[in-house]
Amino acid sequence: MHESAGQGILVRNMKKSRIALIFSALLMLMANVGCNTKSEIEDLTSGACLIKSVTLGTLNRKMHTLSRSGRDSIYTIKVTGSLYPLTIDQVNQRIFNVDSLPVGTDPTKILISELKASGTVSIQSKITGKDTVVTKKDSIDFSTPRIITVYATDRVSTRKYQMDIRIHKEWSDSVTWQRTASGLSALSSVSQLHALTVESTLYAFGLEGTAPVVLTASVESPQQWTRHAISPVTLDVHSVVRHGNRFFALASNQLMTSTDGINWTSANATGVPNSFTQLVGSGTKHLLALSGASLVSSTDGGHTWTADALDSSAPLPLDENAGIVFASTVSKNYEKAVVLGLRGNEPVLWQRDLDLSGTDTFGWINFPLDATRRGHFPTLQNYTLARYDGALLLSGEKSDGSFGGLYLSRDNGYTWLQKELKAPTISGATSVTATVDAKNFIYIICAGSGEVWRGRINRLGWKNEDTLFK
């Protein structure tokens, strides 16, 4: 059967209409795929203009070293840029590395090894202000933040990002020290210094002659100290600890307590012991003390005490001692107690696990120490212990009262090293103590010279930036 001419025209027109309809639908779909819209369809006329990921390439880092003759020389090493991921903040249109590149990295020759984007990426010239296409072969000067623009393939839609390559300006593990005070009269004639920090206040307990005093200063103004006389005059300034919201100390071997560190009253302790030798630690619930040849503890604010079990007959540090309680790395329900010091000239170390739930009671474990091994416990006097950088920080005095240095132990008191904390050169001190505040600053307080030094490991002062953008 043959179709007529009119029927042929009608069929051809219907075919054209279908083609036009399909073409119109495609145009509408492409129009809806604009900038900031996720789509699986990206063709030659897409409006998508997003940077999806950026990876840094191999970078140059300049290092300094001293030759045997004392000359400063510079050499270059390579830095794997991919180890420092770039974060893309699509909300605020920023690109940056949360973990800064190491100090000495050359910011003027940054290579990009991988760049994924929906569109063509260009960078604004620092000289002309015009855009040039970013390529993997070109090194880019990021000594200042740069403007990156993505041009969509529709040649209409664009999106600008500010790209900032961050480089540390200080060595992460170095300590920066500042002498905040010198020649302070309040510290001129104090001996047997013993310091601790409570919130934003520094407390330095000591003796003026035979009379106990406490010096206080704000962590914000460590150059301004106020002197306070202490009552009673028999207070043992080296025994002072902070437990809960009160101070505890010994006076004539009896337990005393104070709210301000100045005025002290009896704690009315009962049970074992009849007298105390030294307070050696304070935790969330436990107050710890030496009593003759025993270690004793209280969990009710110092009212009642019990003798703790010892795993051996090894000596306790009765001659020079210090102690500390800190959060356990095993469980949030536990704390670790460390008591150390000297018996004669022999180093002594005891440890105990504290169960905050009260379910289990653990005794003290003795750890024999070798005074001849590398990293052995230093023989000093007037020890002070603090928690710092996840380790134990120890300070002390030499026999003449001069500064004995700062030591760190990362194995809970077994090994002590000075190389991680290069302390400042301190001279003229007749008694020295150290304490740590909540911002990771170490304070070295010096009687005689009246100096106060403040410092911290640089990386402990770096701020972490949030990567959840709203």
Image (spheres, rainbow, N blue to C red):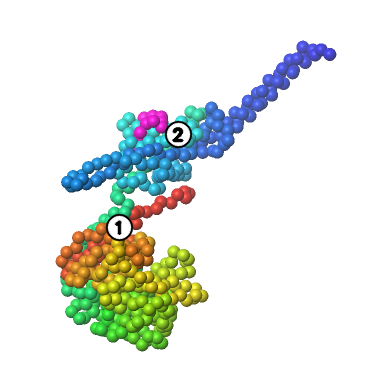
**Quadrant in the picture for residue 180:** bottom left
Q: Nearer the viewer, residue 203 or 363?
A: 363
Q: Position of residue 435 (x, y in %)?
A: 29, 67
Q: Is residue 228 above or below residue 273?
A: above
Which amino acid lies under the numbered mark 2 shown in the image of this protein? Val
Image depth: mark 2 or mark 1 in front: 1
**Quadrant in the picture for residue 252:** bottom left
Q: Where is residue 380 in the image (x, y as percent from the top left)?
A: 25, 70
Could you say whether the residue bearing mark 2 is in a helix, strand or loop? strand
In this image, 83 relative to 126: left or right? right
Query: Is residue 52 one of those drawn in magenta?
Result: no
Q: In this view, does 374 lie above or below 36?
A: below
**Quadrant in the picture for residue 106:** top left
Q: Nearer the viewer, residue 249 or 72?
A: 72
Q: Is residue 377 visible?
A: no
First to last magenta residue range: 130-144
* Label number found at residue 150: 2
Q: Which of marks 2 and 1 is nearer the N terminus?
A: 2
* Label number found at residue 211: none
Q: Where is residue 407 in the image (x, y as percent from the top left)?
A: 29, 63
Find the distance from the CA under tag 2 to the CA under tag 1. Answer: 46 Å
- Residue placed furthest toward the right: 1
